[in-house]
Amino acid sequence: MEQFDAVDVIRTKRDGGVLSHDQIRWVIDAYTRGVVKDEQMAALAMAVFLRGMGREEISQWTRAMIESGERMDFSGIGRPTADKHSTGGVGDKITLPLAPLVATFGVAVPQLSGRGLGHTGGTLDKLESIPGWRASLSNDEVLHQLGEGCGAVICAAGSGLAPADKKLYALRDITSTVDCIPLIASSIMSKKIAEGTGSLVLDVKVGSGAFMKDIDAARELARTMVDLGADAGVRTRALLTDMSTPLGLTVGNALEVAESVEVLAGGGPADVVDLTVALAREMLESAGVRDADVEAALADGRAMDTWRAMIREQGGDPDAPLPVSKHTHTVCAEADGVLGALDALAVGVASWRLGAGRAVKDDPVQAGAGIELHAKPGQRVRKGQPLLTLHTDDEWRIPRALESLEGRIGIGDSAPEERGVVLERVE
Ligand code: URA
């Protein structure tokens, strides 16, 4: 005999009421067991989307999703743990240099990641362009790599972690209920809390290429997640960072791995280095490591050594050449002037259309596909100068990618206002 009726729960939220702890616990559990049907959960998700949830409801919702599955326990590895989660952006390869960089200072980084869907890339897709690298590890392998290995692991989150979220996220994706702060916050935080990290730094993206297009919404999302972390005993802080233009000079799987390796070799584009360093400092500080010279660890090769160990421990060859695409097409500046805008969403969609991302879960992705940028907003360009190079294995994809860039590359007389990649901090 079920404790509640799904129709009553939906009606409560539809009419703007507050769901009780018991209603929330029941509906999430019953949905995971298949008693509450997809169409009922879809109606409830839409009611939440339209009516919102209060702080206590979000907290209970998150707890119920954590309780739907297993919790990892890193207390036996003998090192503090810190993780980072990005809300997703274009050219966001920061996890790749960041995880080994932080591990270099004796803090274990259990980075359980996902694949890309739509225009934002997935960390696992990027790393899978390295020959031999394995995304799926057993819990024992994760614990071994964190405790006795290099201290950093980037792998697929197992199916036992917050299974309610896996089901609900797929449902939200097809019912236009993804971009809703209570649902995003509980989705992200349920997985991160279940993962068992001691501290967590959130990179909340703001701008055209992000879920949150404006800073007020991003601030609210960050505040909500930081509070959820604190409620669960995970030291959590957030940076709001710019996603109006792609991060770095590459978008696409193997292209982003190559750029990450440049950062680990002490080079790389300034915005990627700045964000990597800022997030590393936050992670180390929240794990109790003060005054770490993170720039020195990039410059002197220590972070690179950890990267190479991390790739090898997961079966990859850090020295193997990365895949390259079969076709390229270069877009040049149509006038002299200053590059004013290079829209993140347009570049993300173009890269996805070139084959770097997937439209449907489990579609294959092209390792070599994507976009190389030759200039960043604020830079002076001359007519005919290359601005972007498109990469793909299928020539027929190029016109569709160019379509998404149409009118999204602005060349004018004056430079856009300069601002750093980190916009705000929420603790
Ligand atoms: N990422 C998640 O894991 N969940 C969301 O709801 C949105 C982004």
Image (cartoon, helix red, strand yellow):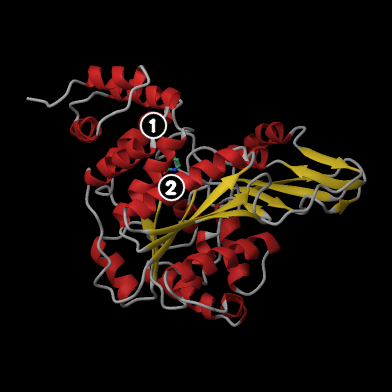
Q: Position of residue 305 (x, y in %)?
A: 50, 78
**SS class of the residue under badge 1?**
loop
Mark count: 2
Amino acid tagged 2: Met
6 and 125: which is toward the camera: 6
According to the picture, the residue beneath numbered tag 2 turns out to be 225
Q: Is residue 129 above or below residue 321?
A: above
324 and 373: which is toward the camera: 373
**Is residue 111 in sight in this rendering?**
yes
According to the picture, the residue beneath numbered tag 1 turns out to be 53
Left or right relative to 68: residue 424: right
Residue at mark 1 to residue at mark 2: CA–CA distance: 14 Å
Where is residue 183, by image quadrant?
top left
Amino acid tagged 1: Met
Q: Position of residue 245 (x, y in %)?
A: 68, 46
**Is residue 175 in sight in this rendering?**
no
- Mark 1 and mark 2 lie on one chain; the one further toward the N terminus is 1
User: Looking at the image, which residue is at 47% across and 40% down?
Assistant: 117
User: Looking at the image, which residue is at 30% across and 65% down?
Assistant: 142
403 and 201: which is toward the camera: 201
Q: Is residue 30 above or below residue 364?
A: above
Q: Is residue 23 above or below residue 59?
A: above
Left or right relative to 292: residue 337: right
Report crowding for label 2: few under 14, some 14 to 19, many 20 or more residues within 10 A (C-alpha).
many
Q: Residue furthest bottom?
A: 300
**SS class of the residue under badge 2?**
helix
Q: Quadrant of ligand 1?
A: top left
